[in-house]
Every structure is written in C-alpha cells, then in structure tokens.
C-alpha cells in the first residue's frame, strides 16, 4: 500500500469535484492506494479493482497505453471512463457494481511489448475502494529501486531535522523561550510596584503587595496574599475589568494559602497590550466562587 498520495491524483479529484473522503467515511470504506505488477504468467488473468459509486479510481501506468483501444464491458450507463493521458485512466462509477457482477476493462499498451494488454475486473467491495493504482509493466531496475529509496531517505532526513528543531524550540524556557514565542521584544519586560489603597479584607483575603510585569501582548501580576480567614484558600481564576480579561494561568508554589499565612500568587493575562498607567480592577476566585480577593485598582 502506498504511503504518499501523488499530486496528479489530487488534481484529478479536484477537477471532477468528487468529495471522496467525506463520502467514503460515511460508508465505512477505506481508501486504498496500491501497486500492481504485471507478469508474463498472469497474462489474461483479470486484475480485480474495487470501485464504488461517487468515488474516483485512478489507474497510473509506467508505459503508454493505446487510448483508442481501451474498452469496457456493457456498463457505460453506470461507469464513466476517462482516458486522461497516455498513462492515466480514471473511472467514476455512478452506481455500485452488483454483488455478483464483474465489469471487465481492457487496456492495451501502445509499444507492442509483452504483456500486450491488461484486463481489470471492476467489482464493489464493502470495506475498500481503490483510489489510486499504479500499474507496473516494465521491470524495475536496481538503479530505479535505489533512486526511490534515496528519495525516501532524503525526505525522512528533512523531517527528522524539522522535528529536532521543533523539539528544541518547544524545550526553550526563560528568556530564550519568551523571545522565540514573541512575548518579549526589544523593550524587554517592564515592571512597576503600584501603591495599593488601604482596603478591608474581602472574605478574609487581602493583597499586601503587588508587582506588575508587562511584556509584548501579556501582563503578569505577582501578589503577596494574606489569608485572615479560618479555611485554606486556593485561587483558580483571575479577571481584570472594566474590560473583562481572564487569566490564562493562576499559579503558586504552595497548594493553598493557609489560615493566618501568606503566599505569593502569580496570574498571567494575554492577548492585548496594557498601556503604562492603565488602571484595572483585579479579582481572584477559588474553584467554587465562594471566596474572592478583590483589589479595586491596580495601576499598570
């Protein structure tokens, strides 16, 4: 079975307007690409082809065919035959071949060499459709096989190099990762520590200190949070307003802020550039929404 679809087959599908993939998935049939090698001993024995209504089957030959001599059995009302070039024949059934029926397609070759022709038996298979069949009549030399192998190896080497590059890019962290991701530009990371207005704790929670980090398309807030309540608190979501922005990450080293304890919480927002001096309302909530930390105004 072939692994790579050839551009000629794809172009043919587009030109004929056949949505093969969608139709065959609905019918549960697998699209098959394969090679058929003709031999002297098999002369006169039909090669079975699996065709299906609404699906295109392309036959590609390694030597020229006699286009005028291509003949198909009595099924012109159900099977459309297109001899596109000297080496390409396409079959498009308008209806499935009956379960007990075999429609014969005879394709003679133009060069007079043996075998002089090939006969295909068109049948319908419940599980497979031949989308592309490469018919090999001329013997493949060792040089041809080696050339194909070298081509495959070259393609694999290129993919390996691309994969290694992607892995290295994905493994980059810290400043390197930020530069590669485009989240840190020439302006670097700007920071400021705004002065917080004295406020009463909300739900027993208050922020003692906030540091703002701003970069290209993102802002992160580092908050020192004190829990004056009686139960541990773990923030899981954060929002900025009046323009409602939700944090992409809410992280902390500790599993939660213990009662009477202090812990650092870092929240990160992305998707826009926050101008210097812009003031936002910051709200952090736990997973239940029962307790929240509210800071009326943080100046970026």
Image (cartoon, rainbow, N blue to C red):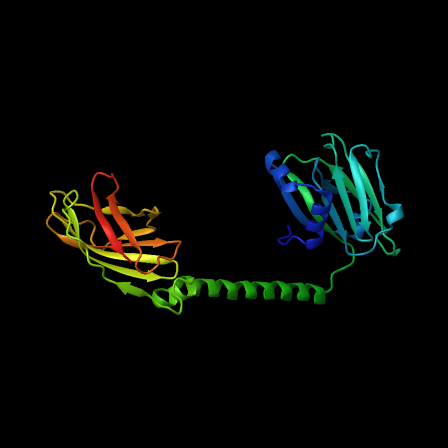
Q: Is any part of residue 269 visible from this angle?
A: yes
The answer to whether residue 172 of the structure is visible from this angle is no
Q: Give the vertical position of 197 relative to 130 (above or below).
A: below
Task: Count the marks.
Answer: 0
Task: Please indicate whether residue 197 sits to the left or right of residue 69 in the image.
Answer: left
Q: Is residue 43 left or right of residue 144?
A: right
130 or 266, which lies in front? 266
Outermost residue to the bottom: 186
Front residue (pair 175, 184): 184
Identify which residue is drawn at 73% across, 41% down.
49
Residue 143: % across, % down: 71, 67
Residue 83 position, x and y percent, is: 82, 47
Residue 124: quadrant of the picture = top right
Q: In this view, does 46 lie to the left or right of 30?
A: right
Where residue 60 sits in the image (x, y, percent)?
75, 51
Which residue occupies the foreground of this view, 114 or 255?
255
Which quadrant: the C terminus?
bottom left
Residue closer to the observer: 202 or 100: 202
Q: Position of residue 133 (x, y in %)?
A: 71, 48
Q: Would you identify the image quadrant in which residue 181 lies? A: bottom left
**Residue visible at 12% across and 52% down?**
261
Residue at 54% in and 62% down = 159
């Amino acid at each position: 079975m072939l692994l790579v679809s050839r551009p000629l087959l794809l172009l043919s599908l587009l030109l004929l307007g056949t949505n093969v993939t969608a139709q065959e998935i609905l019918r549960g049939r697998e699209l098959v690409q394969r090679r058929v090698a003709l031999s002297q001993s098999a002369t006169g024995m039909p090669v079975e082809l699996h065709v299906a209504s609404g699906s295109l089957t392309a036959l590609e030959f390694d030597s020229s065919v006699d286009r005028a001599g291509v003949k198909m059995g009595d099924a012109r009302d159900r099977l459309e035959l297109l001899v596109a070039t000297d080496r390409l024949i396409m079959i498009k059934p308008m209806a499935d071949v009956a379960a007990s029926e075999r429609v014969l397609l005879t394709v003679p070759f133009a060069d007079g060499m043996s075998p002089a022709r090939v006969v295909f038996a068109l049948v319908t298979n419940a599980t497979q459709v031949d989308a592309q069949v490469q018919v090999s009549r001329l013997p493949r030399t060792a040089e041809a096989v080696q050339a194909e192998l070298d081509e495959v190896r070259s393609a694999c080497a290129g993919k390996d190099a691309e994969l290694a590059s992607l892995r290295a890019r994905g493994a980059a962290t810290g400043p390197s990762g930020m530069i590669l991701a485009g989240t840190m530009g020439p302006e670097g990371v700007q920071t400021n520590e705004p002065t917080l207005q004295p406020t009463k704790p909300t739900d027993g929670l208050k922020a003692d200190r906030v540091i703002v980090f701003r970069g290209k398309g993102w802002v992160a807030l580092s908050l020192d949070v004190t829990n004056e309540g009686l139960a541990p608190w773990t923030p899981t979501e954060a929002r900025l307003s009046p323009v409602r922005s939700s944090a992409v990450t809410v992280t902390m080293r500790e599993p939660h802020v213990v009662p009477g304890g202090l812990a650092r919480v870092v929240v990160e927002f992305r998707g826009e550039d926050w101008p210097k001096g812009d003031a936002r309302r910051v709200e952090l909530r736990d997973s239940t929404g029962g307790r929240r930390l509210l800071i009326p105004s943080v100046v970026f």
